[in-house]
Image: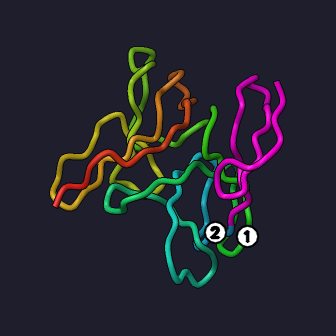
Amino acid sequence: MSFSGSFFVGGLISGDDTDAETVRVPATLNEAVTAGDLLRPITNGANGFLEKADDRGVHCVGVATSNASAGESIDLLQFGVGTVNFSHALTDADVGKAVYVSSTAGQASLTAPTASGCAIIRVGFLQNSNGRCLILPITIALYS
């Protein structure tokens, strides 16, 4: 199945080697990122409007699809299947678990935060122990 058109922030849906449909949009970075980093929007960024997400923010809009420096543009994976960087090791027993934004900038965790001032942001669900995830970002709760 092939789609063309816009669903999220002008992103196009296109198939990739996973045979899953994905939503990717071009985005300019405020800081250097590595492929697999979780990203959030910011205002008044000196170099761009995306930076690494952590559980102190209120959003995660997707995953960096490549390495890039501040001021460069990358494709942001907003929906589909992609590899995410984790703040801890994964095992086969973790497959199927929910994935959350961690306290480490750009990294994911299998544990939802519970501390005051944190946001529970579910990124998606783990597909294998190499960090491959079904990406479906949603903010669930904010702790004050």
Instruction: In the rendered view, tell whether residue 46 sits above or below residue 110.
Output: below
In the image, residue 16 lies at what x, y percent? 79, 32
For the residue labelled by badge 2, is the local secondary structure a helix, a strand or a loop? loop
Q: Is residue 67 left or right of residue 124?
A: right
Residue at (46, 29) in percent of width and height: 125
- Classify mark 1: helix, strand or loop: loop
Residue 105 drawn in magenta: no
Q: Disc 2 marks which residue?
A: 29
Which is more N-terminal, label 2 or label 1?
Answer: 2
Between 15 and 87, which is closer to the camera in this rendering?
15
Is 21 above or below relative to 34?
above
Disc 1 residue type? Glu
- Whether residue 15 sits left or right of residue 116 in the image: it is right
- As for residue 23 lying within the magenta part, the answer is yes
Decide which of 124, 90 is in the foreground and name it.
124
Residue bearing the label numbered 1:
72
Give the percent coordinates (x, y) of residue 7: 68, 47
Q: Which residues are magenta?
A: 1-27
Which numbered marker is on residue 112?
Answer: none
* Residue drawn 36% across the image and 62% down it: 57
Query: Quick one: quadrant of the N terminus?
Result: top right
Label 2 CA crowd tier, 10 Å (few <14, some 14–19, many 20+): many
- Position of residue 38 relative to residue 32, above or below, is above
Q: Residue furthest top?
A: 93
Q: Quadrant of residue 46?
A: bottom right
